[in-house]
Amino acid sequence: MLGYNIESLNEEQKSALNAIDGAILVTAGAGSGKTRLLTHRVAFLIDQKRVSPYNILAITFTNKAAGEMKERISQMVDGADQVWISTFHSMCAKILRREISALTPFDKNFTIYSDTESEKAVKDIFEERSIFDEKDKLKKSLFYHLSAWKNGVMSLQEYLDCHSDDEDMRKIGMLMSVYEDKLARLNALDFDDLLRKTYDLFKNNPDILNRYATRFEYILVDEFQDTNTVQYELVKMLASVHGNVFAVGDEDQCIYSWRGANFKNIFSFKKDFPNVKVFKLERNYRSTSSILNVANNVIKNNLTRLDKNMWTDKGEGEKPVLYNAYDERDEALYVAKEIEKLKSQGFEYRDIAVLMRVNALSRAFEEAFLSYNIPHRIFGGFKFYERVEIKNIISYLRIFVNKRDDISFERIVNFPKRGIGEGGLEKLRALAEGKPLIETVCSELIFNQPALNKKLASFISTFKNLDQEDKKPLSDFVKKVISGFEIKGAYSSGSEEDLNRLLNIEQFISCMKE
């Protein structure tokens, strides 16, 4: 036991820690030590209350937060690796890998589609039905309604009835149904499906729900104000046996309502769970009183909140400054001048960071910094797994696991280039007659298409050979796929861009090893 020390908690945190059973709501202001409380509570349950780590579920909102929680708890008590600590989506994906066969026609080898693959599925639907979509208006509306529906608990028909007055809703409803049928045929889920399918699984299979609800004697949920409707219902379902839920949140920090988060779940929690104990964490360890005074004066105007007043003993500190810029250029030049002032006061450039909401805002700052000769680095851009060379390799891997995944097959059948254009794909689709494309390509049907057979001969041979291979260890199989399909050869121009892509492929192999 390395870092488990209840005495390091303040009195507010200790009070919440010692409330063990039943529903507990902790409203925790920013910088009030909620992560410390959560990790100590898990350690306390294991060490003092002799709860098996296997029976504890802790839900956070980011993979990074989940990783940090695992690391901290592992330094406090033995058995931390048995505590189920994950995001909502990761938890649901894990449950579905085990149980989704109860939702016909899916099986455990389902593919999880990114936005890119979901858009490809919709594009195919539009082309099949000769739908002209000027400026992607219909597509955007379709994805909005798909996400709104899946992050709630209504049936599709109930959702459509609630929006029957919306323009184009009849067509959108039809497309939603067609999209769902297509993903089911492909044995694929989009990101929102991870939550919704788990809800459907539990709702329609009480025996499966009971197994998980019985297992999780104690449930902890971080950032509770950011839960949406289906996430809240999942928490209620999982707590249906033991009723021990420890929810930590701050309705004043809800900034994700645009993607379905509902801070009112905090108030619903008080109604839906009997005898809820409420605790407040009001001491801030992060900021000075000048900053907290500004924050308190802003949030006190929120109409729906649990009253609390953040305080600190860190002293008054410098007063925050608000600069109302004329435009983005004025804003960037103001920041550049302030950086130069700080430099003249003895600070180093590496001590200074500029935070912005979206990468698109960086251009004005880059230009301002160049004009002031301020050295800088931009962090952001494409995420590693969204880079085209990585997505291509992942698509190859997917068709070995889920042979119904036509979206992944269509992505890689002409990568590296094999002369398979849209005409060739149309022929393959016609041959398949609704069956998986990879199975059609590997069947005798392809012999009746000499031109396609010749172009795909090497691909077919490689796929069949690798499909018989042992897939473990995964890193070795990835190397065989990259080598067998000559993927690196697609980036052999010697250009800086191709060199970077080759380096990314090597990094991907290293990731698999780790």
Image (cartoon, rainbow, N blue to C red):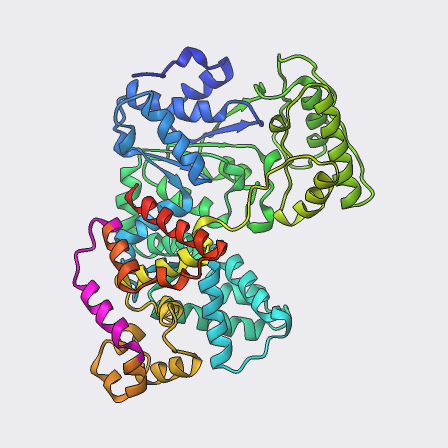
- Residue located 62% across and 46% down the image: 358
User: Residue 223, relative to residue 320: is it above or below?
Assistant: below
Give residue 30's quadrant in the image.
top right
Residue 104 makes an appearance in the image = yes
463 falls in the magenta region: yes
Percent from the top left, x then y, of residue 290? 71, 20
Q: Can you say which quadrant of the picture contains the C terminus?
A: top left
Percent from the top left, x then y, of residue 172? 55, 71
- Residue located 58% across and 18% down the image: 283
- Residue located 20% across and 55% down the image: 471
Report the residue that reaches farthest toward the right. 326
The residues colored magenta run 455-475
The dominant secondary structure in magenta is: helix
Give residue 356's quadrant in the image.
top right
| Front in this rendered view, residue 201 or 488 | 488
| Front in this rendered view, residue 272 or 109 | 109
Residue 113 makes an appearance in the image = no
